[in-house]
Protein backbone atom coordinates (compact mmCIF):
# COMPACT_ATOMS: atom_id res chain seq x y z
CA UNK A 1 0.00 0.00 0.00
CA UNK A 2 1.48 3.32 -1.02
CA UNK A 3 0.42 6.79 0.03
CA UNK A 4 -0.76 9.21 -2.62
CA UNK A 5 -1.03 12.96 -2.31
CA UNK A 6 -3.76 14.67 -4.30
CA UNK A 7 -3.91 18.43 -4.70
CA UNK A 8 -6.96 20.29 -5.93
CA UNK A 9 -6.96 23.93 -6.98
CA UNK A 10 -10.07 26.09 -7.17
CA UNK A 11 -9.98 29.50 -8.79
CA UNK A 12 -12.39 31.95 -7.16
CA UNK A 13 -13.32 35.25 -8.78
CA UNK A 14 -15.72 38.06 -8.00
CA UNK A 15 -17.89 38.74 -11.02
CA UNK A 16 -20.10 41.65 -11.97
CA UNK A 17 -23.05 41.05 -14.22
CA UNK A 18 -24.52 43.55 -16.68
CA UNK A 19 -26.87 44.96 -14.02
CA UNK A 20 -24.00 45.83 -11.64
CA UNK A 21 -24.56 42.92 -9.24
CA UNK A 22 -21.55 41.08 -7.82
CA UNK A 23 -21.33 37.32 -7.32
CA UNK A 24 -18.64 34.76 -6.54
CA UNK A 25 -17.66 32.42 -9.36
CA UNK A 26 -15.46 29.37 -8.93
CA UNK A 27 -13.98 26.82 -11.31
CA UNK A 28 -16.63 25.70 -13.79
CA UNK A 29 -18.96 28.68 -13.21
CA UNK A 30 -19.48 31.19 -15.96
CA UNK A 31 -19.26 34.93 -15.60
CA UNK A 32 -19.17 37.76 -18.08
CA UNK A 33 -16.79 40.24 -16.41
CA UNK A 34 -14.25 38.96 -13.89
CA UNK A 35 -11.77 40.61 -11.56
CA UNK A 36 -9.05 38.52 -9.98
CA UNK A 37 -9.18 38.84 -6.19
CA UNK A 38 -6.29 36.68 -5.04
CA UNK A 39 -2.88 35.81 -6.39
CA UNK A 40 -0.22 33.75 -4.68
CA UNK A 41 3.13 35.43 -4.32
CA UNK A 42 6.36 34.40 -2.61
CA UNK A 43 6.46 35.29 1.10
CA UNK A 44 6.95 37.71 2.67
CA UNK A 45 4.89 40.38 0.94
CA UNK A 46 6.18 43.69 2.21
CA UNK A 47 4.52 47.04 1.65
CA UNK A 48 6.36 49.60 -0.39
CA UNK A 49 8.29 52.12 1.69
CA UNK A 50 6.18 55.17 2.36
CA UNK A 51 7.74 58.50 1.49
CA UNK A 52 7.96 61.38 3.89
CA UNK A 53 8.62 65.09 3.70
CA UNK A 54 11.87 64.97 5.67
CA UNK A 55 14.83 66.46 3.80
CA UNK A 56 17.17 63.81 5.29
CA UNK A 57 15.21 60.61 4.87
CA UNK A 58 18.18 58.18 4.81
CA UNK A 59 20.75 57.24 7.44
CA UNK A 60 24.45 56.99 6.73
CA UNK A 61 27.29 55.72 8.93
CA UNK A 62 30.53 57.68 8.51
CA UNK A 63 33.93 56.94 10.06
CA UNK A 64 37.17 58.89 9.76
CA UNK A 65 40.24 56.61 9.92
CA UNK A 66 43.98 57.26 9.76
CA UNK A 67 45.60 55.11 7.03
CA UNK A 68 49.27 56.05 7.45
CA UNK A 69 51.54 58.47 9.29
CA UNK A 70 54.90 59.61 7.98
CA UNK A 71 56.65 62.24 10.11
CA UNK A 72 54.24 65.14 10.51
CA UNK A 73 51.89 63.89 7.78
CA UNK A 74 48.76 61.81 8.27
CA UNK A 75 46.65 60.21 5.54
CA UNK A 76 42.94 60.05 6.45
CA UNK A 77 40.15 57.98 4.90
CA UNK A 78 36.41 58.71 5.17
CA UNK A 79 34.46 55.43 5.10
CA UNK A 80 30.67 55.31 4.81
CA UNK A 81 27.87 52.91 3.88
CA UNK A 82 25.81 55.31 1.78
CA UNK A 83 26.73 54.21 -1.74
CA UNK A 84 29.38 55.28 -4.20
CA UNK A 85 29.46 58.82 -5.65
CA UNK A 86 26.32 59.96 -3.80
CA UNK A 87 27.87 62.60 -1.61
CA UNK A 88 29.82 65.83 -1.67
CA UNK A 89 32.72 65.83 0.83
CA UNK A 90 33.99 68.76 2.85
CA UNK A 91 37.16 68.46 4.92
CA UNK A 92 38.31 70.79 7.73
CA UNK A 93 41.14 70.70 10.28
CA UNK A 94 41.74 72.79 13.40
CA UNK A 95 45.41 73.34 12.55
CA UNK A 96 47.85 72.45 9.81
CA UNK A 97 46.92 72.03 6.15
CA UNK A 98 45.07 69.41 4.15
CA UNK A 99 45.52 68.26 0.56
CA UNK A 100 42.71 66.25 -0.99
CA UNK A 101 44.12 63.14 -2.69
CA UNK A 102 40.72 61.67 -3.62
CA UNK A 103 37.15 62.56 -2.68
CA UNK A 104 37.42 60.31 0.42
CA UNK A 105 41.18 60.56 1.16
CA UNK A 106 43.24 63.55 2.36
CA UNK A 107 46.83 64.22 3.42
CA UNK A 108 46.86 66.19 6.68
CA UNK A 109 50.09 68.10 7.22
CA UNK A 110 50.09 68.34 11.00
CA UNK A 111 51.42 71.40 12.84
CA UNK A 112 54.54 71.04 15.03
CA UNK A 113 54.02 69.32 18.40
CA UNK A 114 51.38 70.94 20.56
CA UNK A 115 47.86 70.34 21.80
CA UNK A 116 45.61 67.76 20.20
CA UNK A 117 44.15 68.76 16.85
CA UNK A 118 40.84 67.90 15.23
CA UNK A 119 40.05 66.80 11.68
CA UNK A 120 36.48 66.63 10.41
CA UNK A 121 34.77 65.44 7.26
CA UNK A 122 31.16 66.06 6.34
CA UNK A 123 29.06 64.31 3.71
CA UNK A 124 26.05 65.88 2.07
CA UNK A 125 23.71 64.16 -0.35
CA UNK A 126 20.19 64.63 -1.65
CA UNK A 127 18.61 62.65 1.20
CA UNK A 128 21.33 62.15 3.83
CA UNK A 129 24.18 63.90 5.63
CA UNK A 130 26.82 62.90 8.19
CA UNK A 131 29.84 64.29 10.06
CA UNK A 132 32.83 62.39 11.50
CA UNK A 133 35.75 63.69 13.59
CA UNK A 134 39.24 62.48 14.49
CA UNK A 135 41.29 63.89 17.38
CA UNK A 136 45.06 63.56 16.93
CA UNK A 137 47.99 64.42 19.15
CA UNK A 138 48.51 65.07 22.85
CA UNK A 139 45.68 66.34 25.02
CA UNK A 140 45.99 69.97 26.11
Image (tube, helix red, strand yellow):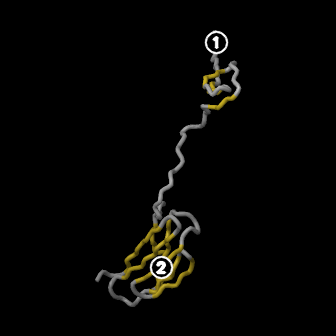
Residue 54 spot, x, y in % from top left: 46, 61
Q: CA distance from mark 1 to mark 2?
A: 75 Å
Q: Secondary structure at mark 2?
A: strand
The residue shown at (37%, 77%) is 135
Q: Nearer the viewer, residue 127 or 114?
A: 127
Left or right: 41 in relation to 98: right
- Residue beneath label 2, please? 91
The residue shown at (56%, 80%) is 101
Q: Can you say which quadrant of the picture contains the C terminus?
A: bottom left
The residue shown at (47%, 81%) is 74
Residue 117's image quarter? bottom left
Q: Nearer the viewer, residue 65 or 102?
A: 102
115 up-or-down from 31: above or below: below
Residue 2 spot, x, y in % from top left: 64, 12
124 up-or-down from 23: above or below: below
Left or right: 115 in relation to 29: left
Residue 82 spot, x, y in % from top left: 52, 63
The residue positioned farthest toward the bottom in the image shown = 112
Could you classify mark 1 by the number of other residues whose Cα lies within 10 Å: few (under 14), some (14-19), or many (20 or more)? few
Q: Can you say which quadrant of the picture contains the N terminus?
A: top right
Q: Nearer the viewer, mark 1 or mark 2?
A: 2
The residue shown at (30%, 80%) is 139
The residue positioned farthest toward the left in the image shown = 140
Q: Nearer the viewer, residue 33 or 18?
A: 18
Residue 50 spot, x, y in % from top left: 50, 51
- Residue beneath label 1, please? 2
Q: Secondary structure at mark 1?
A: loop
Amino acid sequence: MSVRTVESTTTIRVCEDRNGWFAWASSGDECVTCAQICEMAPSPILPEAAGDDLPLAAAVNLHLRPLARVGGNLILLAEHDGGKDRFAYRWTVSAGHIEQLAHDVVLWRLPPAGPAQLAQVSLKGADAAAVASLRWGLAA
